[in-house]
Image (spheres, rainbow, N blue to C red):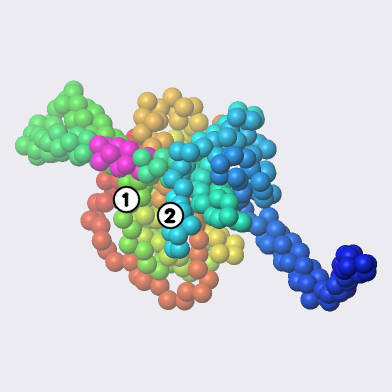
């Protein structure tokens, strides 16, 4: 109850006026209002954006939510004034009028840059104009935007670089093809003279030119392929293949040309069928390149072991020479950088198939290259590889990469 009492004089009589009100509903309304206020306050405080209420004319902040308090606490003292300055467009209290946000870069107390987005709106409370503001910390978003712009810039730069290398490599191929064709023509026209020549000077000169032509062609092709792989322009024709057959056939074909150097490739596998989704040309390229790296620096009377073993959904391929690998020949090879580019190409190709590669040189006389590629245990059917290469393809690759 609410009781109000007052006294007054009515003629010569003193009287009391007592007003008694039942304010139960009023009290309940006040409690509800307080509860509602706390709910809204809690809601406003969990909002990640900073919210403040300010006197529009006096420019003093009346209320801050937790997020705004955290933001303003990190600013230099003079920076808080930036949130209330007049250069930000303020929306009126008209319905459906959107708040216009403006970006501001401020410094924290630690001197670090903080990117803010500030928007304001005018509202009327008890016949007084108030300014309600929203402040967002968009530093992370700005950083992401900068990273995306940097990535896009790098993509454009990589594209330009790739186009340059590809065009340059094609330009180099033209005179190289002329040189190779000329050598073939000389060998054809002067075949009898070359065979009968006692000093073998012409024959040696032709061999040197051919040797360097093969090496240069290999380098140009690797540069083109590496540029395409790193720029994600490498085209693949993926299908299901039995990689056991792919690798075994490559080893057998490659082995034919090693007899003159007394080097032998021994292939072994734990399973006869291991199916993977790959481009067969990519797998052949990888095996040829890695075999050539091992063979190029292997001594005579060497045995190169190629083993396949599946563990779960990964197939391990091991290529090794246990005790007749000439590490010093590799270190002193003047074409070492060209060989390393070829190795880098194989690394990038294997990444396309969620694979990896490692090289282990336990001592100066041995080398083991291990590579893994993904296999698919659920695939039973696979495609037989057709004959897509010329008969002398492996021999050409042998000359180009091993180049004894």
Q: Which mark is residue 233?
A: 1
The residue sitting at 50% across, 64% down in the picture is 375
Give the number of the mark in front: 2 or 1.
1
Choose between 147 and 244: the one closer to the eye.
Answer: 147
Residue 77, x across and y down, in percent: 64, 30
Horizontal relation, residue 392 to residue 158: left or right: left
Question: Residue 95's image quarter?
Answer: bottom left
Choose between 279 and 203: the one closer to the eye.
Answer: 279
Q: Quadrant of the C terminus?
A: top left
Horizontal relation, residue 21 to residue 199: left or right: right
**Residue most extreme to the front:** 12
Classified by dominant secondary structure, the portion drawn in magenta counts as: helix
Residue 100, x across and y down, in percent: 44, 50
Residue 124, compared with residue 404, is above or below; it is below
**Does residue 90 show up?**
yes
Work out whether mark 2 precedes mark 1 in sequence or the reverse, and give the earlier one: 1
For disc 1, the neighbor class at 10 Å (few under 14, some 14 to 19, many from 20) is few
Q: Which mark is residue 352?
A: 2
Which portion, as a residue range, is magenta? 154-165
| Whole-number angstrom distance, CA of label 2 to CA of label 1 | 12 Å
Residue 166, x across and y down, in percent: 25, 40
**Residue most extreme to the left:** 189
| Circle 1 SS class | loop
**Does residue 243 show up?**
no
Residue 61, x across and y down, in percent: 64, 43
Residue 152, compared with residue 374, is above or below; it is above
Q: Which mark is residue 91?
A: none
The residue sitting at 54% across, 55% down in the picture is 123
Question: Residue 215's image quarter?
Answer: top left
Q: Are marks 2 and 1 in contact (CB under 8 Å)?
A: no
Magenta span contains residue 163: yes
């Amino acid at each position: 109850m609410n009781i109000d009492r007052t006294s007054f004089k009515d003629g010569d009589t003193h009287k009391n006026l007592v007003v008694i009100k039942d304010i139960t509903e009023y009290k309940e309304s006040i409690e509800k209002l307080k509860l509602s206020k706390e709910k809204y306050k809690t809601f406003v405080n969990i909002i990640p954006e900073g919210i403040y209420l300010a006197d529009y004319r006096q420019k003093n902040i009346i209320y801050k939510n937790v997020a705004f308090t955290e933001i303003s606490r990190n600013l230099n003292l003079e920076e808080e004034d930036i949130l209330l300055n007049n250069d930000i467009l303020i929306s009126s209290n008209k319905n459906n009028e959107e708040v216009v946000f403006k970006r501001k870069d401020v410094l924290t107390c630690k001197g670090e840059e903080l990117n803010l987005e500030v928007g304001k709106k005018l509202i009327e409370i008890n016949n007084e104009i108030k300014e309600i503001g929203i402040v967002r910390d968009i530093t992370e978003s700005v950083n992401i935007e900068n990273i995306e712009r940097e990535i896009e810039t790098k993509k454009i730069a990589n594209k330009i670089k790739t186009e340059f290398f590809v065009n340059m490599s094609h330009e180099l191929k033209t005179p190289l093809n002329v040189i190779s064709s000329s050598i073939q023509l000389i060998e054809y026209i002067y075949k009898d003279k070359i065979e009968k020549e006692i000093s073998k000077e012409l024959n040696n000169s032709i061999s040197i030119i051919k040797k360097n032509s093969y090496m240069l062609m290999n380098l140009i092709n690797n540069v083109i392929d590496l540029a395409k792989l790193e720029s994600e322009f490498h085209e693949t024709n993926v299908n299901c293949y039995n990689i056991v057959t792919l690798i075994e056939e490559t080893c057998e074909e490659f082995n034919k040309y090693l007899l003159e150097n007394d080097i032998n490739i021994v292939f072994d596998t734990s399973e006869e069928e291991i199916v993977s989704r790959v481009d067969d040309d990519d797998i052949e390229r990888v095996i040829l390149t890695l075999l050539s790296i091992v063979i190029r620096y292997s001594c005579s009377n060497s045995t190169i072991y190629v083993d396949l073993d599946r563990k779960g959904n990964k197939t391990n391929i091991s290529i090794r020479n246990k005790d007749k690998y000439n590490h010093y020949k590799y270190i002193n090879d003047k074409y070492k950088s060209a060989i390393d580019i070829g190795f880098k190409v194989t690394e990038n190709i294997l990444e396309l198939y969620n694979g990896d590669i490692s090289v282990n040189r336990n001592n100066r006389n041995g080398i083991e290259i291990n590579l893994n590629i993904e296999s698919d245990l659920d695939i039973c059917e696979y495609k037989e590889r057709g004959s897509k290469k010329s008969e002398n393809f492996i021999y050409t690759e042998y000359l180009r990469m091993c180049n004894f």
